[in-house]
Image (cartoon, grey):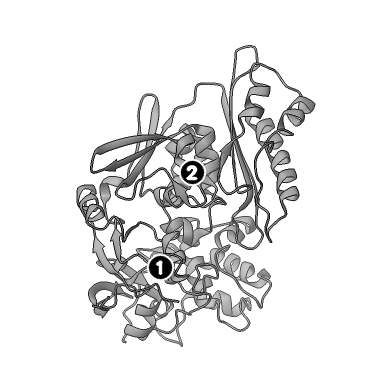
Amino acid sequence: MFPAPFTYHRATSVSEALSLLQQHADTGKVLAGGHSLLPIMKLRLAQPEHIIDISGIDELRSISFGADSVTIGALVTHRELATNNELAEAVPLIQQMARVVGDQQVRNLGTIGGALAHADPAADYPAGMLALDVTVLATGPNGDREIPIVEFFQGFLTTALEPDELLTGIRIPTLPAGAGSAYEKLPNPASGYATVGVAAVAVKADDGSIADLRVGITGASDVAWRATVVEEALKGTSPDEAAIKAAAAQATDGVEMLDDKHGPADYRARVTRNLVRRAIARAIA
Amino acid sequence: MSPSTISVTATVNGTQHTVDVEPRTLLLHMIRESLGLTGTHTGCETGQCGACTVLLDGKAVKSCMVLAAQVEGRTVTTIEGLAESSDNLHPLQNAFWEEHGLQCGYCTPGMVLSTLALLRDNPHPDEAEIRHALEGNICRCTGYHNIVNAVKAASERLSAEDLAEVPSTVEV
């Protein structure tokens, strides 16, 4: 299985990548770890005439810890996210997700920037990125742009990135003390992709009630979403198991579930409601 | 579009090679066809089965999911880089042999290289860690039990020197 022929460009800096992208915005694609792009090129679902390889750009490979946020470069691999102890302490949810992405070989090469830009509806990260309320960092001919994650995922394999923009990283706001998080996933037994994946981030007030709650859901629909109805139902309360279950029952209201050979819509909806319940229970435990 | 070629220089099993390939050439095909190292097996070619696993700068990767162009200046280890000769197998290969960790053998080169990468990270993995590390390598014969046994046996036997071993030079 070969991709269709293309011209290969190796970018060694962000500015070089941007100028290549401007020259080839209509017919070019950015290559990082290759684990999202190469499969669809082999299937000829994508036939870019120009490949702009950014995998050698060192400036996109860092994780930096600020006073109120953590910034992760686009080329940081799933392996690094799964094994970086400082990151695991600052944002444990990232490690939980990174450990279940693909397999050892995929985690060694696949990057967070590539995974987000590809926007596979069954990828793990979208759920957690929504729950963590991250900001996507992009740069283009008109300079840098910050995209709130709730505006980033627009549909099946579709994001808010412009064709001549490069995703350079994400910024994760540091959670306050007393915050908890969890990722619950039902993997497809063959592919390991999320049939449904649910991430929850909860912040508790001094009295033990839920001060803030964010729930992100991936895999169940053609685009990841925030279960705001569930969040609003539980905020300000100290829910018991039954109250969490009642709120979680609304997680799929108004959302069109995927309906395919990996699971009918009704099955996906029931799995989603159950994983929402479990993720919230773990996040507030 | 003309299939113009590009030049790629990489160190494979300790020897530096320069090859001319089409930009769309996968590392798998560069290894098998340009270098003639057919121990790296072509499996699903969709990144799922792991039969084509090699080490890239010491980390296990599926060579059907990497462009040859992306290994410029980097180091590749294939199964041919492990043993000095067929009479003197790497201890990891001996462990697979002795524990009967294979039947048809098609997945074995990938299994061995994924295991080497695992044991370098974690010299004494438990069963769950072994199975997690080998999720990217599919075997349709063994049912995995003997593979897990082979990895356990290897982890008890391999010295730090075996794990750190610089790949031997292979004549191609």
- The structure residue drawn at horizontal position 48% and vertical position 52%, both measured from the top left corner, is A157
Residue in the foreground of this view, choosing between B39 and A133: A133
Above or below, B43 against A264 in this view is below
Residue in the foreground of this view, choosing between B58 and B161: B58
- The structure residue drawn at horizontal position 26% and vertical position 50%, both measured from the top left corner, is A58
Q: Residue tagged by mark 1?
A: B55
Q: Residue furthest right?
A: A242
Above or below, B110 against A217 in this view is below
The percent coordinates of residue B27 (x first, y second) are 37, 73
Disc 2 and disc 1 on one polypeptide chain: no
As drawn, is B52 to the left or to the right of B6? right
- The structure residue drawn at horizontal position 73% and vertical position 21%, both measured from the top left corner, is A239
Q: Which of the numbered marks, if any, corresponds to residue A154?
A: 2
Chain to which mark 1 belongs: B
Estimate how packed mark 1 is, as few (under 14), some (14 to 19) or many (20 or more) residues with alpha carbons within 10 Å: many
Look at the image and tell me whether residue A238 can be seen: yes
Q: Amino acid at mark 2?
A: Gln
